[in-house]
Image (cartoon, rainbow, N blue to C red):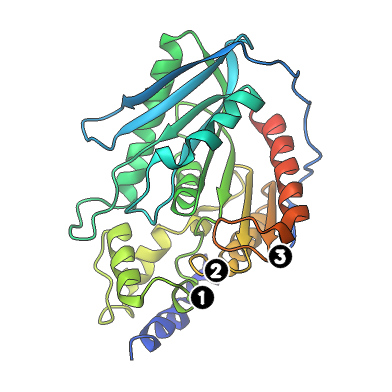
Amino acid sequence: MAAISSIIVAIIMAILSIFGVGGGSSGGGSNNGGTTPVNTTPTGYDISADVSYGPHEQQKLDIAFPQGVGTTLGLAVHIHGGAWFGGDKSQKTDEVMTYAKEKNMITANVNYRLLLLDSPQYTCQTILEDIQAAMNKIAEVCRSKGYAVKKAMVWGESAGGHIALMYSYTYKDRCPFTIGLCYSICGPTNLTDAKYYTDNDIPPAQMLLLQSRLTGQDINAGNLLTESTANALLRVSPVNYVNAGTVPTIFNSCGRDKLVPKSNGDDLEKVLKMYGVDYYYAEFANSNHCGRSDLDYATYTALDNKLDQMINKYVK
């Protein structure tokens, strides 16, 4: 991505200097919604909690099957946030269950091995491998219970939104399900964005440590100008993987976000539009990171409506 690479030096100089998401729009095709699902109320829910998909204690997931609405359903898989080194699936249990209760979808809520600030043992690649293992486990549980998956939506917020994008964009051909839609709530998209480092509530030293763990490469004030550092940051940036076959994407940014700048959302929109990918992008101008200010009611209501349309079109 020449446009992205050309700003790396400016980004690095911006990082060195500190050591002394637009209104809703859509592109790449029509987003006029799909067939409205039948309003059928499930008779109950078959819920399995803390299903292990690997030997590590964090390799667990919850999965819920709405009963009485058929056995061939769409799937919503949630990835939690927490700056890649914190958080837990339990933070969003109620929100995740709305997909089973209101949209008649199989829902899964996934934990993964978190980055360790005192050890380089885990990276972004480790997390992606965990999501893949979790997907395989979900497929196994679905088969064992007699359910079939039409298509899947992968979604998350903040760091979980970043992983949802990375997985949907780079693992779609390996996933046991067809990924029909990716939904990112304030997820980082471009780790070569200067504003990601200069206008952030995370202290610079901790930010560089986070990026070192995420990339698996030591990133510090002494090696920022190297080509390997530039390439490492690009390897964990979803914008770097967009092409004409990229999964339809719905996402937002927040105008008062001090963790993931609005420019990250703008950068993703540019490349999605350039490659003709179907997308919807909204800015919650008055909201903080992953928040919803009452002043942005019209904007986030429009996004929620568009999300329903895109689920109906691409997942159900």
Question: Which label's residue is closer to the chain start, 2 or 1?
Answer: 1
In the image, residue 215 sits, relative to residue 248, either above or below, namely below
Contact (Cβ within 8 Å) of mark 2 with mark 1: yes
User: Label 1 belongs to which residue?
Assistant: 195
Q: Nearer the viewer, residue 204 or 237?
A: 204
User: Label 3 belongs to which residue?
Assistant: 22
Given the current orientation, which residue lies at the most extreme bottom position?
A: 20
Q: Which of 12 and 68 is in front in this view?
A: 68
Q: How far apart are marks 2 and 3 (CA)?
A: 12 Å
Contact (Cβ within 8 Å) of mark 2 with mark 3: no
* SS class, disc 1: helix
- Residue 252: x and y, percent? 63, 55
In the image, residue 82 sits, relative to residue 191, either above or below, namely above
Residue type (three-letter) at the residue carrying disc 3: Gly
Q: How far apart are marks 2 and 1 (CA)?
A: 6 Å
Residue type (three-letter) at the residue carrying disc 2: Pro
Question: Which label's residue is closer to the chain start, 2 or 3?
Answer: 3
Residue type (three-letter) at the residue carrying disc 1: Lys
- Residue 129: x and y, percent? 33, 40
